[in-house]
Image: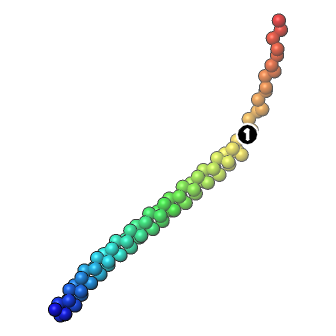
Amino acid sequence: MSKSSPSRMSAARRNAETILSQSRKRQESFKQEQQQAQDAMTLKTTRLRELRLAKEAADQEAADAAPAPAPKRSKVRRSKQT
């Protein structure tokens, strides 16, 4: 009886280790996917920030180059005379 017990234990242990290694592989794969998604989001954010800053700089140059508009004349409000 003692001979069959170690083989059962080793078979059970092999099964458990197989399941554990599969679980670790899935977990590692998930972490890699998360890191790739985060890297992609960071790259996208950086690119959009650069585009926004370039647009703001171009808008500022255009505003500086454009002649200043003439000041508006305010209307004088007069009271109604009765």
Colouring: rainbow
Secondary structure category for the residue under label 1? loop
Alpha-carbon neighbours of circle 1 within 10 Å: few (<14), some, or many (≥20)? few
Question: Is 60 on the left or on the right of 31, as rendered?
Answer: right
Q: Write the residue at 54% across / 55% down.
A: 48
Q: Write the residue at 20% across / 89% down.
A: 5
Residue 58 is situated, as x and y percent measured from the top left of the image, at 63, 50
Q: Quadrant of the C terminus?
A: top right
Residue 78 is situated, as x and y percent measured from the top left of the image, at 82, 16
Pick the front one: 64 or 56? 56
Pick the front one: 65 or 45? 45
The answer to which quarter of the image holds residue 19 is bottom left
Q: Write the residue at 19% across / 93% down.
A: 2
Question: Is 51 on the left or on the right of 9, as rendered?
Answer: right
Q: Amino acid at mark 1?
A: Pro
On screen, residue 35 above or below 2: above
List the residue tagged with mark 1: 67
Question: Is 25 on the left or on the right of 69, as rendered?
Answer: left
Residue 53 is situated, as x and y percent measured from the top left of the image, at 61, 54
The answer to which quarter of the image holds residue 22 is bottom left
Judged from this view, the residue extending furthest toward the front is: 1
On screen, residue 37 above or below 59: below
Residue 73 is situated, as x and y percent measured from the top left of the image, at 79, 27
The answer to which quarter of the image holds residue 37 is bottom left
Q: Quadrant of the N terminus?
A: bottom left
Report the number of discs.
1
Q: Write the residue at 64% across / 47% down.
A: 59
Judged from this view, the residue extending furthest toward the top is: 82
